[in-house]
Image (cartoon, rainbow, N blue to C red):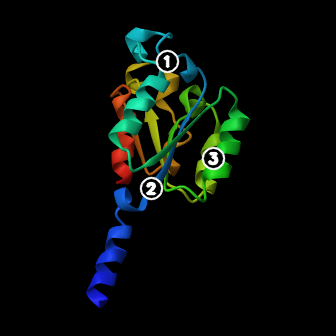
Amino acid sequence: MKEEAAASSFLLNIPYIRNMKLIIINGPNLNLLGKREPEVYGDNSFEEYLDAIKGKYPKLTIEYFQSNIEGELIDKLHEVGFDYDGIILNAAAYTHTSIGIGDAVKAIETPVVEVHISNVHSREDFRHTSYIASHAKGVIFGFGLKGYELAIESFL
C-alpha cells in the first residue's frame, strides 16, 4: 500500500500526468504573423501554430495572450506569475526597450522562457539587448515558431 502511494505521488509530479499549466504571451505586432515579413516570420498565423502545438501536447493546458500594449503585458505577467507552471514570453520589440517588463519578470515566481522567432543577433544592434533575459529561466531565438515548442519542452 505504501509503495502504491509513493508511485502515485511520483506520477503526479510528472508534467504530463499532473496537467501542467503554461501560457504563451506574445507582444507587439505578433498578431500579424503570417502577414508581416513572411521571409523573417513565416507565413503561418500564430493561431494556426498554436492549434498544432496544443494537438502535440494534449495533456498540457496551454493558454495564449497577445497584446500590442506594454502595460497589458505587464498586467498579464502579474496575473499568471504566481499560479502557472511556466510562461513563454515573446515580448517582441519591448524586449529591447521595456525595463518594466523585465522588472515584472523579476517580480513573479513562475519561471519564464524568453522566445524570439528570428535570430535577434543577426538583426539591428538595438535588438542585441534584452531587459528580460537576466530574469528568465532561458532564452531561445532564431528557430522560427519551433522556438515556442522548445520552450514548452524546457518545462517538461
What residue is shown at x 49% (from left), y 56% (from top)? 85
Of residues 13 and 42, the one nearer the viewer is 13
- Looking at the picture, does residue 153 appear above or below residue 15? above
What secondary structure is marked by label 1? Answer: loop
Of mark 1 and mark 3, the one earlier in the sequence is 1
Distance from label 2 to label 3 (Cα)? Answer: 17 Å
Return the residue found at the far front. 1
Q: Horizontally, is 20 left or right of 156 in the view?
A: right
Of mark 2 and mark 3, the one earlier in the sequence is 2
Of mark 2 and mark 1, the one earlier in the sequence is 2
Q: Position of residue 54 (x, y in %)?
A: 41, 38
What residue is shown at x 46% (from left), y 14% (from top)? 34
**Amino acid type assigned to the residue bearing label 2 in the image:** Met
What secondary structure is marked by label 3? Answer: helix
Identify the residue position indicated by label 1 in the image: 33
Residue 68, by quadrant, is top right
Of residues 127 and 63, the one nearer the viewer is 63
**Amino acid type assigned to the residue bearing label 3 in the image:** Leu
Distance from label 1 to label 3 (Cα)? Answer: 22 Å
Residue 10, by quadrant, is bottom left
Q: Horizontally, is 98 left or right of 47 in the view?
A: right
Q: Position of residue 125 (x, y in %)?
A: 48, 22
What residue is shown at x 38% (from left), y 52% (from top)? 155
Does residue 4 appear anywhere in the picture?
Answer: yes
Identify the residue position indicated by label 3 in the image: 77
Q: Horizontally, is 142 left or right of 101 in the view?
A: left
Residue 98, by quadrant, is top right
Q: Horizontally, is 36 left or right of 55 in the view?
A: right
- Looking at the picture, does residue 88 appear above or below residue 52? below
Q: Position of residue 154 (x, y in %)?
A: 35, 49
Label 2 crowd bin: few (<14), some (14–19), many (20+), radius 10 Å: some
